Image (cartoon, grey):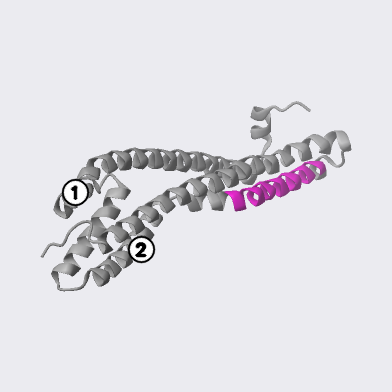
Amino acid sequence: MDLDILHMWEAMNPVVKGVVVLLTIEGIWCVTITVDRLLMLMTSKRRSRKFAAEVAEPMERGDATAVMQVAEGSMKKSHLARFIYEGVKTFQDNVALGNSSERAADFATRNLERTGENLSTNLNKGMSVLATTGSTAPFIGLLGTVFGILGAFKVIGSEGGGGLSTIGPLIGEALYVTGYGLMVAIPAVMLFYWLSGLIMKYEAGLANAGSELVDQLEAGALGDPR
């Protein structure tokens, strides 16, 4: 049986066509999310490396004010800059209120944890689309196949009979919808786990940067504003 997509589309009933359209939309959406997250990660890494180079010198000399100025100018573009800014600012504010360095560092740690949660939400934006597509696309395709088979039997009933030569092509075309669902679902699942791994690795790098910052704050490496 030749795969004539145009002929198959014309022969499909409206429900099966709706299933194919829905699967196509899910597939395009998954590709869009994947490209968006990859561009976001690449851009964020590049900007974070640039920020790290800019902030290295004031960090080495322990100039907290300069560190905050550099971070404030870059935090809208760099997740790392936001992390550094939030940590240093919280520490500075609490020390200025009379808290000890240890207690101020504890407040900074808590704020970095909250900042990390917010960043994680932003980094994982759209990932639910991949997960949902991976789990539902096979069943959506199966639904299309069921209606396709029902349509095949309807054709047989209206013609008053028919053998394998009649029902075979109709059922085969209906099964293509299940295959299409799997073609959408399998890449979606693979992309979800791949992107999740990249994002988790990126988040771990930010968490390590935050921990190193807290260690420096506790050791007084960035000085004391008083």
Residue 224 at least partly seen: yes
Res 77 label: none
Residue 210 position by quadrant = bottom left
218 with respect to 28 (left or right)? left
Which sits earlier in the primary sequence, circle 2 or circle 1? 1
Q: CA distance from mark 2 to mark 1?
A: 26 Å
Looking at the image, the residue that sits furthest to the right is 163
Locate the N terminus by quadrant. Answer: top right
- The residue identified by callout 2 is 113
Q: Residue at x 27, y 40 (%)?
A: 53
Looking at the image, the residue that sits furthest to the left is 226
Amino acid on which disc 2 is placed = Glu
> In terms of secondary structure, what is the magenta stretch mainly?
helix
Does residue 81 lie above or below 39 as drawn?
below
Residue 98 position by quadrant = bottom left
Amino acid on which disc 1 is placed = Arg
Q: Residue at x 75, y 45 (%)?
A: 149
Whether tag 2 and tag 1 are in contact, CB under 8 A, the answer is: no
In the image, the segment drawn in magenta is: 134-156
Res 61 label: 1
Does residue 73 lie above or below 216 as drawn?
above
